Amino acid sequence: MLRSFTISYLFVLLGLGAAESAAQVTRFQVLKADELVGNVIAMRMPTATGTVYTMTSHCELDIVWTQVVRSSLRTEYTDGVLTSCHTSLRVNESVRDSSSMIKGADQCFVHPDAAFSCERTTQWTTSRMYFEEPVGQPFIFVESVLKDCPLVPSGPNRYTLTFPNRNVNHYIYKDGVLQEIHVERTLMDLVFRRA
């Protein structure tokens, strides 16, 4: 029994290794006031018909007491068209936010609000920004809120993305490669820095 479990486990690990070798992987450290508080792993994987982007993060933040924050994102493109995205944000194992969009479905969902019609004008998403510089893009579709949000150049290879609640992220690129994201929020500011 143990031997068959071990062999099965090895096949799973080998499969994951093969999938990751076909994928483009980028890693970021999450810093709060220059202190390492977490990590982000983003992946871009080719499929038979398009591309899948995934992102996972894990942070431990001291806000009154230690909060363990985990997020996950999966965005899929088929023939260059955004076809689905799903996000989840957990704080201390409780779901704080989540969203889901599937192309062709009449309703989109952002927890805990009611379903709504999901319209967009761009194929650019926040997950795509981890792998490509959004030169000339006036809007980015933000998977967590399922809305197009304005993207404004703020300097050479620098961009500011403004969310519906007025939160902002600042993206910094070098030679077309994302180097840092400065995340400005009400209670704290974070920096995602390429590892």
Image (spheres, rainbow, N blue to C red):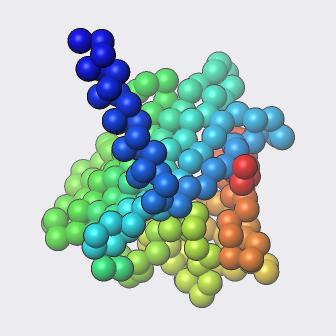
Return the x and y of residue 31 as percentages of the image width and height.
Answer: 75, 42
Farthest residue, direction right:
34
Return the x and y of residue 168 as percentages of the image width and height.
Answer: 64, 60
Q: State left or right for residue 13 relative to residue 92.
A: left
Which quadrant of the structure image shows residue 53? bottom left
Q: Is any atom of residue 3 visible in this view?
A: yes
Image point (29%, 54%), residue name: 100
Return the x and y of residue 193 as percentages of the image width and height.
Answer: 73, 52
Image point (22%, 69%), residue name: 103
Task: Looking at the picture, tell me which residue is in the foreground, 156 or 23.
Answer: 23
Q: State left or right for residue 25 relative to residue 116.
A: right
Q: Is any atom of residue 145 visible in this view?
A: no
Image point (68%, 66%), residue name: 178
Task: Looking at the picture, tell me which residue is in the foreground, 29 or 21.
Answer: 21
Residue 77 vertical position relative to residue 14 in the rendered view, above or below: below
Return the x and y of residue 70 as percentages of the image width and height.
Answer: 50, 35
Residue 59 vertical position relative to residue 158 in the rendered view, above or below: above
Farthest residue, direction top:
1
